[in-house]
Image: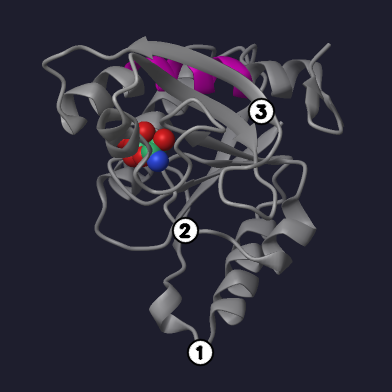
Amino acid sequence: CRLVVLVSGSGTNLQALLDAVAAAPDGSYGAEIVAVGADRGDIAGLERAERAGLPVFVCRVRDHATRGAWDRALAEATAAYEPDLVVSAGFMKIVGREFLARFGGRFVNTHPALLPSFPGAHGVRDALAYGVKVTGCTVHFVDDGVDTGPIIAQGVVEVRDEDDESALHERIKEVERQLLVDVVGRLARNGYRIEGRKVLIP
Ligand code: GRF
């Protein structure tokens, strides 16, 4: 199973996938990362990819005349690597119609809250501000809404009284990395079906 991973930041979720692939040189993880894409240069996520010897591509919104043109360029750059699955691992842009037309049903995102609560770019901050006692992370397929696609798996994290956004996010990310590695491996090895909102992995 060929994976393209998209990142915008530190890339620790990407690193967890890289480590899972590297830990199984016999290919038993079931997936290989064939390229890493980003919407900006100069991020630790791209350095991690380069250190692993992977091809990288950068597709910046500001280098394109319209958002639609950016979306098309991102879809084409991704498609060039012929992925079976695309993973958004902290990729902080909403993709458009063209990208979804090509990769809908095989585009996986990870979100640092228990969807459908606290979607959007500030899931951790919003959960903390609301005062929830448990939160966590959600790995889901991407559809045309913001963090609304069919849920594949979730992990739970307790909120502590002394938590601030960054402490809570760090604990969520520990769970999130494991969950993402587990989910991607299972999708890759077993295949899956999406029936309505249900994701079935045999
Ligand atoms: C993750 O918590 C992801 O869900 C969120 O941003 C974080 C990315 O972290 N949207 P990293 O770049 O993988 O370290």
Q: Is residue 16 visible?
A: yes
| Residue position for label 3 | 151
At label 2, counting other C-alpha atoms closer than 10 Å, the crowd grade (few under 14, some 14-19, many 20 or more) is some
Report the residue at 80% width, 25% height from top. 198
Which kind of residue does numbered mark 2 sit on? Lys
Q: Quadrant of ligand 1?
A: top left
Precedes in sequence: disc 2 or disc 1: 1
| Residue position for label 1 | 65
Give the Cα separation between the discs numbered 2 and 3.
19 Å
- Residue 20, how many percent across, how many down? 48, 17
Residue 179: say if magenta. yes
Q: Secondary structure at mark 2?
A: loop
Under 8 Å from ligand 1: the CB of mark 3?
no
Q: Is residue 5 left or right of residue 43?
A: right
| Residue position for label 2 | 93
Under 8 Å from ligand 1: the CB of mark 2?
no
Which kind of residue does numbered mark 3 sit on? Ile
Farthest residue, direction front: 130
Q: Is residue 52 visible?
A: no
Nearest the camera: 167 or 132? 132
Which kind of residue does numbered mark 1 sit on? Ala
Nearest the camera: 96 or 149? 149
Number of callouts:
3
At label 1, counting other C-alpha atoms closer than 10 Å, the crowd grade (few under 14, some 14-19, many 20 or more) is few
Nearest the camera: 192 or 32? 192
The span picked out in magenta is 174-184
Give the Cα separation between the discs numbered 2 and 1.
16 Å
Q: Is residue 136 above or below residue 15?
A: above
